[in-house]
Image: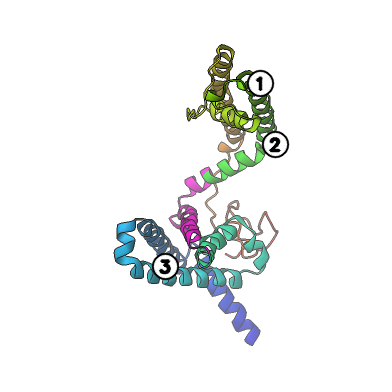
Amino acid sequence: MEKYEKERLRQRIFDTVFEANTRQGKLFDICLLLLILISVGMIMLESIPSINARYHKVLIISEWILTSLFTIEYGLRIFSVKKPWRYIFSFYGIIDLLSILPFYIGLFFPAGKFLANIRILRLLRVFRIFGLTQFTHGKNVLVLGLKESRNKIIVFLSFVMLIVIVIGSIMYMVERNHPESGFTSIPISIYWAVVTLTTVGYGDISPVTGFGQFLASVVMIIGYGIIAVPTGIVTMEMNKFSNQEVPKNTEMCPSCGDDYHLDGAKYCKTCGGKLNY
C-alpha cells in the first residue's frame, strides 16, 4: 500500500512539473516562467551599481528565495521520473541544473552568480506550455538540421583553422620587420587572421607593407564566402525535415524527458519507455 501511494504521488508530481497538457501542469509552468523572468530581471538590476546600492538586501533575499524554489523544483523533477539519470543528462535536465548552479558558485566566487541568467534558456518550454506545436516542430527541425550537419561543419571549421594558421604565419613573415603594425608573433598574427576572416575587423592590428595589405584584402574577400558556407550546410539539412508532418503530441516521457513524439505513439522513441496518456 505504501509503495502504491508513493507511485501515485510520483505520478501526480510528474503530471504537474513535466506535463503541459493538464490544467495543473500548465498553471505550474506559467508560474515557473514568471519566476524565471523575475529572477533574470533582478540579476540584471543587481549589476546596475546605483540600484544595487539602494536595494542590495532586497535583491539578495529575493534571489535566495527564488533559487530555493528552483532547487526544490529541480529535486521534484528528479524524484518524479522513473530514470533520474536520463533526465539529469538530458537537454532540459542540464539546463535546469545550470540555472541553479551559478547561485551556489557565487557563494564562493561572487561574480559567478551573474551566470544565473542562463536560466533564461528554460523559457524554451514556452512552446510546449501554450501548445504551439508549429513552433515545437520548428525547434526540432533546427535541432535535427544542426545534428545532421555537424560532421560537415566540423570538416569545414577544421579547414578554416588550417587557413588562418597558414595566413597568420605568412603575415608574420611579411610584417615582422615592422613592429608598428602589431604583428609581433605568429599567435598574434593568427588572431588577426581570425578577426579579418570573420569580417569582425577590430582594427587593433593592421599591415603596413604593400604585400601585407594585398593579403589582407584577399582574406577579407574570402571571409564573405566562408560566412555563407555553414548557413548553406545547415539550411540544406533543415530542408530535409521541414516538410515532415507536425505532431500535436507534446507529452513528456516519464523515463527520459523527451517531449517530441508522433501522434498516437505509445512508447518513447528515445528510450523505449511507455508514455502516459
What is the x, y in percent for residue 222?
58, 20
The residue that label 3 is drawn on is: 63
The disc placed on residue 151 is 2
Q: Dot 1: what SS?
A: helix
Precedes in sequence: disc 1 or disc 2? 2
How many C-alpha atoms fall within 10 Å of the one at disc 3: few (<14), some, or many (≥20)?
A: some
The disc placed on residue 173 is 1
Front position among marks 3 and 1: 1
Precedes in sequence: disc 3 or disc 1? 3
Q: Does 113 lie within the magenta span?
A: yes
Q: Is residue 209 visible?
A: yes
Q: Residue at x 63, y 57 (%)?
A: 90
Quadrant hosting residue 36: bottom left
What is the x, y in percent for residue 72?
51, 73
Precedes in sequence: disc 2 or disc 3? 3
What is the x, y in percent for residue 140?
57, 45
